[in-house]
Image (tube, grey):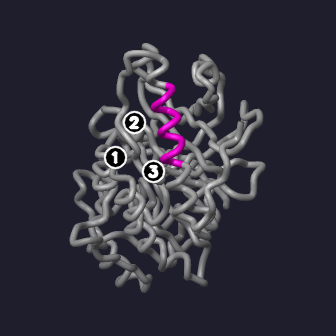
Amino acid sequence: MYVALTLQQVRKPVAAAIGNFDGLHRGHQQVLQPVLSSTIAIRTVLTFYPHPQEVLSGQPRLLLTPPQEKQQLLQQLGVEQLVQLPFTEDLAVQPPHDFIATVLEQGLQVQQLSVGWDFCFGHQRAGNARTLADWGQQRGIQVDIIPEIQLQGERVSSSRIRAALDQGEVSMANLLLGRGYRLEGTVVRGDQRGRQLGFPTANLQLPPEKYLPRDGVYSVWVHHPQEAQPLAGVMNVGLRPTVSGLQRTVEVHLLDWQGDLYGLYLAAELVSFLRPEQRFDSLEALTAQIHQDCQTARQQLYSSRGLRTPTPVG
């Protein structure tokens, strides 16, 4: 997939889906469908970074899918080109008709367009999906407006996914996404505390803007770059209060695999929330609970795939 960071770099003409697409959830995937099936131009996604709400509010915004993760997902879906434009204050105050002229017509040479029903653009969000539909009709350009997508009676949205992750409702978050929510990053050296307790962990260095789920312990499938199949694991998100942790960390213990992980890029796919993070009176009590967490996760993960639970490594 080709990535353009300015309009000058764009390969055109394009069939484009426009949006922030944070999470690339089921609703977003529907917006992409007309573009993915297009045969008249380069299948393109136009998005913005930083997130427009971050620029408009002046507050940092955590993302379900930071740029690198979003790029990987779009490529897997079949997008040929990602146009990731910088969202600036100048762009925020641009009138809708100027955006259409400079970005859609000149910059992208749009031949086909797809947006969600609630898409807004331009100064004070004055432009919307209807604006684009009218423009398309005048220009003879197909503009698809995708209606609201609901699941279990409620709208599929990034905010609903965040709320589910905040509550440890992993199954709901994954259902809304259409895939497992992932925490991915490079394995870096930690304080070796897990190894001292008999449960060596991989400390993941995530993008700083990555949205983390509720603090606690999770069962996960870990995607290892040198393994054909995902590996069963237990993940801890939080401060590790029993050992006086001061910084929120993401640590993964692989249940049935041994080897050196330092420097590798791993992706931990959430399966279920096992328990909240808690403080134990002793390291012995903590060790006993970790052992129980591993047993629970092992049985849960393998049974969910119809596999026989293996004998623990070590």
Q: Residue at x 70, y 41 (%)?
A: 313
Q: Which residue is mark 3?
A: 48
Magenta stretch prevailing secondary structure: helix
Assess whether mark 1 and mark 3 are in contact (beta carbons under 8 angstroms): no
**In the figure, is residue 46 to the left or right of 163?**
right
Q: Secondary structure at mark 2?
A: strand
- Which is nearer the eye, 142 or 269? 269
Mark 3 or mark 1: whose residue is earlier in sequence: 3
Locate residue 299, reporting x and y percent.
Answer: 53, 53
Position of the C terminus, as image quadrant, is top right
Mark 1 residue type: Gly
Q: Which residue is mark 2?
A: 216
The local crowd at label 2, few if under 14, some if 14 to 19, many if 20 or more residues have their Cα within 10 Å, is some
Q: Residue at x 30, y 32 (%)?
A: 58
Mark 2 or mark 1: whose residue is earlier in sequence: 1
Q: Which residue is mark 1?
A: 168
Assess whether mark 1 and mark 2 are in contact (beta carbons under 8 angstroms): yes
Instruction: Please say whether residue 291 is one of the residues in the magenta stretch.
Output: yes
